Image: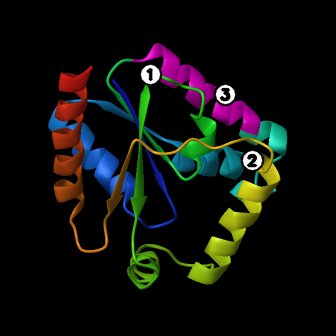
Amino acid sequence: MIIGIFGLTCTGKTSVADSFATELGYQVRHCGELIKQLAARNGRTPNELSSKEHADADEETRVSATQANNLIIEGTFLDVVLADVRNCKLVRLSCDAAIREARYNVRRGGTSFADRESLDAELRQRLYQSIPNRAPDLELDTTSKTADAVAREIAKWLMTVRLDT
């Protein structure tokens, strides 16, 4: 099974994906980390990468989603990147903005949370404005939950999905 976990910055995507993967023995594709590595190799920021470089990375993600089994993919824009990948269950994480900002301030230096939000919005607009997004199969609020608790909720939900199919 392929699971795409997406949402805004600091909703818990990486932590939930890693917790879920550990529990189920799945592999994880961290899209944001892959983009950061690509940008660093080229001496740029993720927002400075060309649309083609982003499109190539998105295509690699789609190929991974169609060829792998037992894979978790986490990233900010998966509602668009994986919109046409039917074998993928999409889970959107949300979280109170103040909690997200507090998480961001603990984990990141450099740019402010407001700047990060703005950069993400600009990137979504530049790369995906004309591409329809896909509604999530499941939405979870991580505001007052641990990553492990959210991972357990996803696992429980997946059991009902498998029973229904």
Q: Quadrant of residue 61?
A: top right
Cα separation, mark 2 vs mark 3, equals 13 Å
Q: Position of residue 116 (x, y in %)?
A: 63, 73
Numbered-mark total: 3
The question of residue 58 being in magenta is answered with yes
In the image, residue 149 sits, relative to residue 161, either above or below, namely below
Q: How far across and how far down the image is residue 84, in percent?
A: 60, 27
Residue 128 bears which disc, if any? 2
Q: CB of mark 1 within 8 Å of CB of mark 3?
A: no
Q: Is residue 27 left or right of residue 51?
A: left
**In the image, is residue 69 part of the stretch drawn in magenta?**
no
Asked if residue 108 is positioned above or below residue 56 in the image, the reply reads below
Judging from the image, the colouring scheme is rainbow
What SS does tag 1 mark? loop
Looking at the image, which residue is at 52% across and 63% down? 8
Residue under label 1, please give it. 87
Question: Which badge, 1 or 2, comes first in the chain's sequence?
Answer: 1
Relative to 93, say whether 109 is above or below.
Answer: below
In 3D space, how far apart are the residues under numbered discs 1 and 2 (Cα atoms)? 21 Å
Q: Which residue is mark 3?
A: 59
Few, some or many residues within 10 Å of mark 1 (<14, 14–19, 20+): few
Could you tell me if residue 143 is visible in this image?
A: yes
**Nearest the eye: 164 or 68:** 164
In the image, the segment drawn in magenta is 55-68
Residue 48 location (% of width, % of height): 80, 57
Closer to us: 29 or 100: 100
> Quick one: label 3, few (<14), some, or many (20+) residues within 10 Å?
some
Mark nearer the N terminus (1 vs 3)? 3
Residue furthest to the front: 164
Tell me the quadrant of the picture where the N terminus can be found: top left
Categorize mark 2 by other alpha carbons within 10 Å: few (<14), some (14-19), many (20+): some
